[in-house]
Amino acid sequence: MLHGRMTRLEAVQMWVNGFNAVPIQMIAKLMQTDPDDWYEVTCPTVGDRICLIDEGEGEGEIVEVYHKTLCKVKMDNGITWRGHMSRMEVEYDDGLPMWGIMWSFSDICDEHWLDDKYGYDGIMAMSQCGFRIFKSFEFGYFFGIDGAGYDFYEVHWLPLYNARGLMWHDPKTEVAAS
């Protein structure tokens, strides 16, 4: 299928099928072998459950993100807290995403878009699309989905394709297919 004659979903499927898929057990083993090489870079986003650090105010949910470093949180005790994200920790069910596969981009252009040093805010965009992102100094970026039982294309991959600014689909083909 040629670029430009695809629906958005077909273009997204082609893009995602080109990613490097890595079993999560492999990532966990690499992290155990060299824990100082790995860290999570996922940005807190709206809807995340958090715990404030050294605030004594407990837990809450992010309701607004002003910039990638500032947010508003509705605390469980009813108080609204505004502040810097460095003063909170996102509460995840586990150290790694629950889905059994993590991915890395196979195309250097995608990798550069993800890496904030190039100024694209890719990590923030991917976080807002529901991905958890980890970085290894030796192996690069890996991302995963902390969910199951729903359509990943609708909730994660299509929004990521849009956030990435890709236009491999043909809007006319999209309309004709619907």
Image (cartoon, rainbow, N blue to C red):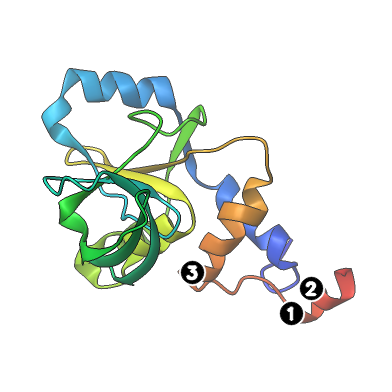
- Given residues 97 and 161, the one toward you in this image is 97
Query: Which callout, 1 or 3, points to the residue nearer the camera?
Result: 3
Kindly indicate the quadrant of the structure image that contains residue 176. bottom right
Q: Crowding near pointer 2: few (<14 within 10 Å), some, many (20+)?
A: some
Residue annotated with mark 1:
171
Give the side of residue 169 with respect to residue 110, left or right.
right
Q: What kind of residue is marked 1?
A: Pro
Image quarter where the C terminus lies is bottom right
Disc 2: which residue: 174
- Image spot of residue 108 (x, y percent): 35, 57
Task: Determine whether label 2 and label 1 are within 8 Å by CB.
Answer: yes
How far separated are the C-alphas under marks 2 and 1? 5 Å
Q: Residue at x 31, y 68 (%)?
A: 121
Mark 1 or 3 closer to N-term?
Answer: 3
- Mark closest to the chain's N terminus, 2 or 3: 3
Q: Residue at x 42, y 26 (%)?
A: 24
